Image: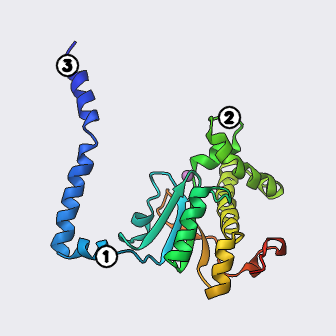
Amino acid sequence: MSSAGNDDRSAQDRSYEVLLENNRAWVREQLGLDPKYFDKLALGQSPKYFWVGCADSRVPANVITGTAPGDVFVHRNIANVVINTDLNCMSVLQYAVEVLKVEHVIICGHYGCGGVTAALSAQSFGLIDNWLRSIKDVYRTYKTELRAYPDQIALERRLVELNVIESVYSLGKTSILQRAWKERGFPRLHGWVYDIADGLIRDLGVNFSSAAMLDEIYRHEL
Ligand code: CO
């Protein structure tokens, strides 16, 4: 056989190199705009925003919000789920709120989220079934509303929104945010959904910076 197949394989194996080339080009571009760009970034970070988003490759926080390095502290996981026993998520949250003192915490889900689709199905995907369980809980909580949707696509879109809203409330239930609200009245929480099909972000209208928005059983005396 010809060596074409092998050549293709080699080209594929080297595909990562373009990222390194892009990086060097980006550094040259930034230094062209501001010779002290990296010197300034190296001094430290003080982002105003903490972003909790999906790991989906089509939803890069900085790109879709027109923000730059240093602007947004980011945590991403499959289907932007917030679980209070997730040491990773809680640690990032604590650092963002107590050390960086971000002013806004944004949970941004997205329509067409594979994690939400998987959670709606009975199919098993292995370990991730356990991660997606909380989305099944969201479905169960809103089952009456969701069953009224005329088709599966509309139902999935609504479940994406409800999963964001529940994640926003999950953040609000943490002692980390409730203590920050009592001490200084911020950060403000926001629930957003990104639409991959048109590039636009919708604000779901669930925005608050007070434990008063939570059912009293979740409010801590601090
Ligand atoms: Co997703």
Disc 2 marks which residue? 123
The residue at the point 46 percent across, 68 percent down is: 73
Could you tell me the amino acid type at mark 1?
A: Leu
Disc 3 marks which residue? 3
Pointer 2 or 1: first along the chain: 1
Circle 1 residues within 10 Å: few <14, some 14–19, many ≥20: few
The reply to whether discs 3 and 2 touch (Cβ–Cβ < 8 Å) is no
Vertical arrangement, residue 209 with respect to residue 123, above or below? below
Q: Is mark 1 within 8 Å of ligand 1?
A: no
Q: Position of residue 171 (x, y in %)?
A: 66, 68
Helix, strand or loop under label 2: loop
Helix, strand or loop under label 1: loop
- Where the N terminus falls, by quadrant? top left
Disc 1 marks which residue? 43
The residue at the point 69 percent across, 40 percent down is: 121
For this rendering, which residue is in front, 156 or 150? Answer: 156
Find the distance from the CA under tag 3 to the CA under tag 2.
41 Å
Helix, strand or loop under label 3: loop
Pointer 1 or 3: first along the chain: 3
Specify the color scheme: rainbow
Could you tell me the amino acid type at mark 2?
A: Gln
- Which quadrant of the structure image shows residue 161? bottom right
For this rendering, which residue is in front, 63 or 95? Answer: 95
Of all residues, the one furthest to the top in this rendering is 1
Q: Position of residue 21 (x, y in %)?
A: 20, 51
The residue at the point 56 percent across, 63 percent down is: 91
Query: Can residue 208 be spotted in the picture?
Result: no
Find the distance from the CA under tag 2 to the CA under tag 1.
48 Å
Q: Position of residue 170 (x, y in %)?
A: 69, 65
- Which quadrant of the structure image shows residue 122? top right
Circle 3 residues within 10 Å: few <14, some 14–19, many ≥20: few
Find the distance from the CA under tag 1 to the CA under tag 3.
51 Å
